[in-house]
Structures are given as C-alpha cells and as structure tokens.
Amino acid sequence: MIAAATEILGMDGLAVSLSADGEAIELMWCTDEGTRRFEDIQFTLGEGPGPDAVRRGVMVWAPDLTRVRPDRWPTLTAEVDEARAVFCFPMGVGAIRVGVLTALRRTPGSLTSSETDDALALAGALTAYCLEDGAPHDAPEHAGFPGALRRAVVHQATGMLSVQLSLSLPKALLRLRAHAYGNGRSLTDTAQDIVDRRLRLAPDGPPPTIADKDGLP
C-alpha cells in the first residue's frame, strides 16, 4: 500500500514515524535510504517539519527547503542536501497523536489538491492501522527497517546519561543530540556506542572520548 503511494503522490520517498511521547518520533518504515537519512537528521536535531507536525498536530509543508525562513529550522536546512520539498501529515485522532507521514521530493514544488487528498487519506488509514497495534504490512525487514521501534536504544542511552551525568531526561537527550551532531554521526549510532560502553560523555569540561571499538573501556 505505502510503496505504491509513493508513485501515486508523485514523491521520491515516504516515511512513517510514530510518536513515542508526543515529542520524540520513532521511524517505523521508509521507502529508501535517502528518506531514512532525512528522518535521522530530523531525529538527531529534534527540529524539522516532522517534529513540528507531531507537536502541533497540523500539516507542515516546505515546498522548497532552500526558501524556508532562516530561523525556522536553521540547522536542518544547512544539513539537508537531497530532499528539496517535504510534506508532513500528522497521524492522529483528536488529541491522540500517533505519528507523522512524511513525503519527500527531490525537486521543489507544492502538492496538487488531489495529491493532498490522497496523502490525507493515506495518513488516516495509517492512523487507524497503528491504533490497532499494527505496522505497515509491506515493511522491508531485510532492508534495515524492522517493524519494531528502531530507536529504543536512544531512550536507553538517554536514561544512562541521565544517571551518569545527573541530568533530567530532556537535558540528557539534548546532550546526546549535541554530541551526535557535533561529530557528524546519527543519533542511533551514538546511542548504541553509549549503551555498548564504547562512548563516555564527560559531565563538563573535557570533550567526550570514544573507547577502542574492539574492547570495553
């Protein structure tokens, strides 16, 4: 269903992400590697049309990322070099926010009214499916996009940092995001290093260190 929708909507990529707590979003499924990279950037930075759509419960469109206000998503727009148009459709019912459907296109331009209607219908169908504890039936497990939440390791690493650095969970996640972005790595890879004891963040002062990957510190 979702794979076919990519062509119907005239998009180059689609992604389905679920909201874990009304703020963080967990990538459940996407069509291609480029879309996955875009979702990872949003998740690492905590900014972009996807997070905005989840927080506000409204459609968030960026028909041309190069023309977005500089102060809207300053870091995201500096990082993205592929997706030129992004359209995010919230998935939810009333006050219940399930997640977001993200559509990406490599060329700028808005959606037609029929494409918008189709995307809204797809978001509605996905909402109903997810509320029944389902997942996209054609998710390619072999392609690195498991049906289970991919980023549970981020929550685990955040909890570890919260204890180690005596920080609140939101501040621990902020430290984790800052380190990932500062080192040009994805949030999930950085979190995995922390969980596996390969990466240790200092409370303050000296920069973080990464232990030898062949052994524990």
Image (cartoon, rainbow, N blue to C red):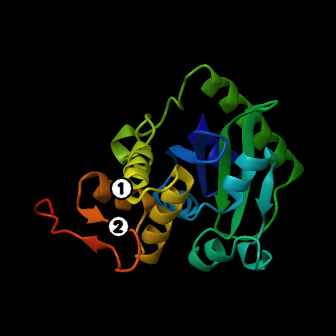
Q: Are marks 1 and 2 in contact (CB under 8 Å)?
A: yes
Apparent side of residue 210 relative to residue 189 in the rendered image (left or right): left
Residue in the image at 72% along x and 72% along y? 65
Above or below, 150 against 173 in this view is above
Residue 164 numbered mark, or none? 1
Q: Which mark is residue 111?
A: none
Which circle's residue, 1 or 2, is located before the other in the chain?
Answer: 1
Q: Position of residue 66 (x, y in %)?
A: 73, 78
For label 1, the crowd category at 10 Å Cα-Cα, with few meaning under 14, some 14 to 19 and many 20 or more, is: some
Say which quadrant the N terminus sits in. top right
Q: Tag 2, which secondary structure?
A: loop
What is the quadrant of the C terminus in the image?
bottom left
Question: Is 161 left, or right, of 43 in this rendering?
Answer: left
Q: Position of residue 64 (x, y in %)?
A: 76, 72
* 68 is higher (above) or lower (below) than 150: below
Given residues 203 and 210, the one toward you in this image is: 203
Left or right of residue 44: residue 185: left
Compare residues 53 and 155 and report the one nearer the observer: 155
Depicted 175 relative to depicted 163: above or below: below
Quadrant location of residue 150?
top left
Task: Judge from the rendering whether residue 139 lies leftward or rightward of residue 15; answer left or right.
Answer: left
| Callout 2 crowding tier (Cα within 10 Å): few <14, some 14–19, many ≥20 | some
Q: Is residue 81 visible?
A: no
Q: CA distance from mark 1 to mark 2?
A: 9 Å
Q: Amino acid at mark 1?
A: Gln
Mark 2, residue position:
201
Q: Residue furthest right?
A: 113
Amino acid type of the residue tagged 2 in the rendering: Leu
